[in-house]
Amino acid sequence: MTSTELITDEDRIRLFANALADDCDHFPVLKLFAPDAGATWLISEVDPDDPDRLFGLCDLALGYPELGYVSLTEIMEIRGRLGLPVERDIHFVADKPLSGYADEARVQGRIVT
């Protein structure tokens, strides 16, 4: 799988725009998930100096979702018990800023979309 299958050019533009914007509580641009590992990422920004470094809400299915940076390369290497690669949720449309998802995730112990 290539990074272009997970993140489109339009997504990259939105992620860069968010990173360069003055405000810091953006709506997630995309949702990635590991279908057989329970991990989920809501990505809102990309580091303008390192396109592999994404920022968002990361849930590794350990009960403690957190905001932070993650490597796109590392996400693409993740495989669950069945060996399935990480996928993009093509139906995901953010309805609140990342902080709203983070607040809910802290209460629920997982990302809820």
Image (cartoon, rainbow, N blue to C red):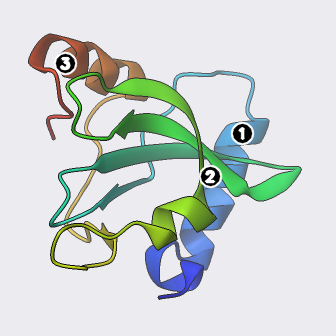
Q: Which residue is mark 2?
A: 15
User: In this picture, is 33 found above or below 25?
Assistant: below
Q: Is residue 95 left or right of residue 24?
A: left
Q: Residue at x 28, y 21 (%)?
A: 64
Q: Secondary structure at mark 3?
A: helix
Kindly indicate whether the residue at mark 1 contacts the one at mark 2 (C-beta within 8 angstroms).
yes
User: In this picture, is 54 found above or below 25?
Assistant: below
Q: Position of residue 15 (x, y in %)?
A: 62, 52
Q: The residue under label 2 is which amino acid type?
A: Leu
Q: The residue under label 1 is which amino acid type?
A: Ala
The quarter of the picture where residue 19 lies is top right
Q: Secondary structure at mark 2?
A: helix
Q: Position of residue 52 (x, y in %)?
A: 71, 60
Check disc 1: other Cα within 10 Å, few if <14, some if 14-19, many if 20+. Answer: some
How far is disc 2 from disc 1 in space, using C-alphas? Answer: 6 Å
Check disc 2: other Cα within 10 Å, few if <14, some if 14-19, many if 20+. Answer: many
Q: Residue at x 20, y 58 (%)?
A: 37
Q: Earlier in the sequence, mark 2 or mark 3?
A: 2
Outermost residue on the right side: it is: 49
Q: Is residue 42 left or right of residue 14?
A: left
Q: Is residue 110 left or right of residue 48?
A: left
Q: The residue under label 3 is which amino acid type?
A: Glu
Q: Which residue is mark 1?
A: 19
Q: Position of residue 91 (x, y in %)?
A: 19, 66
Q: Earlier in the sequence, mark 3 or mark 1?
A: 1
Check disc 3: other Cα within 10 Å, few if <14, some if 14-19, many if 20+. Answer: some
The quarter of the picture where residue 35 lies is bottom left
